């Protein structure tokens, strides 16, 4: 690779070198601030730089109203995790399973339909203290 004047010893890669050779063959030279033809001393001006615009405010997620969610978890579990569990309950542990799987369904062996946290005495963690469905809220 050949050094290019004006880059203070930096070398050009193969693609940049090819572009520089093609531009020089076409009579265009690189000058600070843009490109100029061999006969002109005035470099071309770059187009206007786009002005960054303000981004719209990010909405904080709210808990979906559908589903049975224990009110105790609203303060300790992120709303995004609760929304994901309510929208896809099959992905959460123990959804719609019987309290005691070895017995038939009865008024004393209800299905787990309340979204809760595994252990209320520990902080929420998606792996070690995750969401699960229980028969009722404590």
Image (spheres, rainbow, N blue to C red):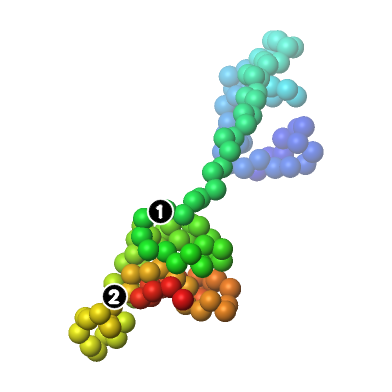
Pinpoint residue 90: horizontal percent, then vertical percent. 31, 67
Q: Which residue in the structure is indicated by mark 1?
A: 65
Q: Residue at x 42, y 53 (%)?
A: 64
Q: Is residue 22 above or below residue 109?
A: above
Pinpoint residue 38: horizontal percent, then vertical percent. 68, 15
Helix, strand or loop at mark 1: loop
- Rendering quarter of residue 59: top right
- Looking at this rendering, what residue extends furthest in the bottom direction? 102
Helix, strand or loop at mark 2: loop
- Looking at this rendering, what residue extends furthest in the left direction? 104
Residue 111: mark: 2
Pinpoint residue 31: horizontal percent, then vertical percent. 73, 23
**Can see residue 117?**
yes
Q: Quadrant of the N terminus?
A: top right
**Can see residue 21?**
no
- Measure how far apart labels 1 and 2 are at the Cα level: 20 Å
Taking the image as shown, residue 60 lies to the left or right of residue 134, namely right
Taking the image as shown, residue 116 lies to the left or right of residue 88, namely right
**Residue 120 versus residue 30: which sits nearer the camera?**
120
- Looking at this rendering, what residue extends furthest in the right direction? 8
Q: Earlier in the sequence, mark 1 or mark 2?
A: 1
- Rendering quarter of residue 55: top right
Q: Residue at x 28, y 78 (%)?
A: 110
**Residue 118 versus residue 34: which sits nearer the camera?**
118
Q: Residue at x 34, y 64 (%)?
A: 89
**Circle 2 crowding by C-alpha within 10 Å: few under 14, some 14–19, many from 20:** many
Q: Is residue 56 above or below residue 30?
A: below
């Amino acid at each position: 690779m050949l050094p290019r004047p004006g880059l203070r010893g930096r070398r050009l890669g193969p693609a940049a070198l090819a572009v520089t050779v093609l531009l020089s063959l076409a009579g265009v030279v690189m000058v600070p601030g843009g490109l100029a033809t061999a006969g002109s001393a005035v470099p071309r001006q770059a187009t206007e730089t786009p002005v960054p615009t303000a981004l719209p405010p990010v909405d904080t997620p709210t808990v979906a109203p559908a589903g049975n969610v224990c009110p105790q978890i609203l303060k300790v579990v992120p709303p995004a995790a609760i929304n994901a569990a309510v929208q896809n309950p099959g992905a959460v542990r123990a959804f719609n399973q019987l309290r005691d799987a070895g017995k038939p369904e009865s008024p004393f062996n209800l299905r787990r339909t309340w979204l809760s946290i595994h252990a209320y005495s520990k902080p929420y963690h998606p792996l070690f203290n995750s969401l699960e469905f229980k028969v009722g809220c404590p």
